[in-house]
């Protein structure tokens, strides 16, 4: 069904036919707008060149135009329903997908939806001040695009809570607006979403590494037997691709600028030249990658085994896996710290599914490293490269929590960690330098000097297009 924009809440779920649900969501809407006003982007502006979803099909799903941001049409969009869809894994494999929530899985499904929903407004809160220091109108527009779509992803989860989880769902929907990123009293649920995103290098790393966790988690929820969740996540993934594009090309452009200056001046010391030293880029990368690895939960988890067996959460590209999709007897190798060494041990594949997903994610992250090293090489910088740190580096969740692992994968004691850590994670001085470069550039076509210009504009518009008007 097409998206109905004549409604107060644009949707393709025939909201008008369910007055109760419509009223409940319309009463949540002012709370959302209030939250957006208080916790959303702080930079005042007249309008922004944004894309808005107008359909959910393969072709031409988005419309680009100037939007006064608080009037953005946040709506509820699910991918088309496949009436023949069947469950691809677990004990219900082969049965028709569920259109309602089975009573016995209510609590677990609600928990998964709440955790997913909690991350969306959290990221908007983390990024709320970035507009004040945008390196160009192009980047500023991308920030707003990411923000409004994370807001829409919140709507996506709130719709499910309201439509399928009754009173407790409505309470959880309300609570999603009450927790806040970094709050001492009521923080966001997952660690990475309570960290700060105080500068644009952090933003690009966040959209590369943390949004990519989103891609993989949404990919597993897209496999869910609960069809409305599956269809919701399928459409969210479409929007998510742009967020990762912002991260990938953002880091590209920072590396490009740094590499160009290193080559031109034959030095690693590009800070006095107004750029970000490669060593600092590596430290930011180490930080964002390691906190994003924490988002996969423990390497072995009975939660994930139950989610899988019960059909709530599948694997990345479940249907392409050449196995029985039940995993009752398979084992897999998982890293573990034993007797002061990191060793691989065999664990039941079913309980190691967070590890499985993390492996897919890590392989994807490596593609970024390859492309950034290619950029370095294209400027003749071949003696230094960027690298992903070891999976055990700087971890707070899972097997490596409580251990000290170097980026190279060596276990060290607390004293060595404390001594060496300034070489591995951003120091106050590194952060201060990056912060010192964060000066807003709001003139059309102009770009801050610490990163290269983008290769092309948005939706065929020129680079000097006025992407944001004040
Ligand atoms: N911080 O059994 P365990 C995105 C909790 S990002 C704090 O090892 P499980 C986005 C865990 O909740 C994607 N707590 O792990 C990106 C559990 O607590 P309970 C977000 C953590 O349950 C950018 C306990 O520790 N979506 O979309 O198998 C911008 C034991 O956990 C953390 C999802 O995550 C942590 N890092 O897996 C915008 C999908 N890790 O329940 C958006 C939904 C674990 O015992 N969530 N804990 O009280 C899930 O699938 C799972 O809950 C997790 C954890 C993967 C998060």
Image: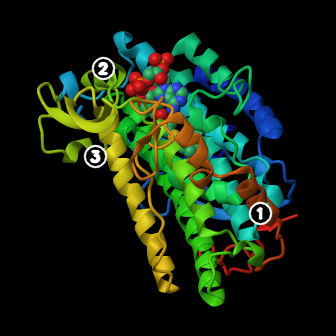
Q: Which colour scheme is used?
A: rainbow
Q: Which of marks 3 and 1 is in front?
A: 1
Q: How many residues crowd mark 3 within 10 Å: few (<14), some (14–19), many (20+)?
A: few
Q: Position of residue 180 (x, y in %)?
A: 71, 30
Pick out the residue farthest to the front: 415
The residue sitting at the bottom extreme is: 264
Q: Could you say where residue 230 lies in the image, as x and y percent from the top left?
A: 39, 36
**Tag 3 secondary structure:** loop
Is residue 222 toward the left or the right of residue 88 in the image?
Answer: right
The local secondary structure at tag 1 comes to loop
Please report contact status of discs 1 and 2: CB closer than 8 Å, yes or no: no
> How far apart, in angstroms, are the residues tagged by discs 1 and 2?
44 Å
Circle 3 residue: 317
Kindly identify which residue carries mark 2: 306
Q: Is residue 180 above or below residue 37?
A: above
The answer to whether residue 28 shows anywhere in this view is yes
Q: Position of residue 137 (x, y in %)?
A: 76, 69
Density class for disc 1 (Cα within 10 Å; few <14, some 14-19, many ≥20) is many
Residue hosting label 1: 134
Whole-angstrom CA distance, mark 3 to mark 1, is 36 Å
Q: Residue at x 60, y 50 (%)?
A: 425
């Amino acid at each position: 069904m097409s998206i109905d924009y004549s409604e107060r809440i644009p949707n393709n779920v025939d909201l008008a036919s369910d007055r109760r649900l419509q009223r409940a969501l319309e009463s949540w809407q002012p709370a959302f707008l209030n939250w957006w006003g208080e916790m959303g982007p702080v930079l005042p502006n007249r309008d922004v060149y944004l894309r808005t979803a107008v359909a959910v099909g393969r072709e031409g799903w988005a419309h680009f135009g100037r939007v006064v941001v608080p009037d953005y049409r946040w709506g509820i969009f699910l991918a088309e329903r496949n009436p023949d869809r069947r469950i691809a894994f677990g004990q219900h494999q082969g049965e028709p997908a569920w259109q309602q929530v089975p009573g016995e899985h209510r609590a677990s499904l609600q928990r998964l939806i709440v955790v997913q929903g909690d991350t969306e407004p959290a990221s908007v809160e983390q990024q709320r001040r970035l507009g004040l220091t945008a390196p160009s109108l192009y980047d500023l527009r991308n920030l707003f695009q990411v923000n409004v779509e994370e807001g829409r992803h919140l709507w996506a989860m709130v719709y499910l809570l309201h439509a399928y989880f009754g009173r407790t769902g409505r309470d959880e929907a309300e609570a999603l607006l009450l927790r806040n990123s970094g709050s001492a009293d009521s923080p966001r649920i997952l660690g990475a979403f309570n960290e700060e995103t105080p500068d644009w290098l952090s933003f690009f790393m966040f959209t590369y590494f943390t949004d990519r966790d989103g891609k993989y988690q949404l990919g597993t929820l897209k496999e869910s037997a609960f069809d409305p969740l599956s269809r919701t996540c399928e459409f969210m993934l479409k929007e998510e691709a742009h967020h990762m594009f912002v991260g990938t090309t953002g880091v590209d452009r920072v590396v490009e600028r740094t590499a160009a200056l290193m080559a031109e001046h034959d030095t690693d010391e590009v800070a006095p030249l107004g750029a970000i030293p490669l060593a600092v880029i590596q430290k930011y990368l180490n930080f964002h990658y390691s906190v994003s690895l924490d988002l996969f939960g423990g390497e072995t988890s009975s939660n994930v085994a139950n989610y899988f067996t019960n059909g709530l959460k599948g694997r990345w590209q479940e249907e392409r896996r050449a196995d029985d999709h039940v995993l009752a007897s398979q084992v897999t190798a998982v890293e573990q710290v034993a007797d002061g060494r990191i060793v691989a041990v065999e664990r039941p594949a079913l309980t190691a599914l967070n590890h499985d997903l993390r492996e897919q994610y890590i392989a994807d992250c490596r593609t970024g490293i390859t492309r950034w090293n290619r950029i370095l090489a294209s400027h003749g910088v071949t003696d230094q490269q960027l690298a992903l740190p070891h999976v055990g580096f700087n971890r707070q969740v899972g097997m490596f929590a409580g251990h000290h692992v170097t980026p190279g994968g060596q276990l060290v004691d607390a004293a060595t960690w404390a001594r060496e850590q300034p070489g591995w994670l951003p120091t106050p001085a590194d952060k201060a330098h990056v912060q010192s470069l964060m000066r807003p550039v709001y003139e059309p076509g102009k770009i801050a000097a610490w990163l290269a210009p983008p290769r092309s504009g948005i939706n065929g518009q020129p680079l000097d297009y006025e992407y944001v008007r004040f």
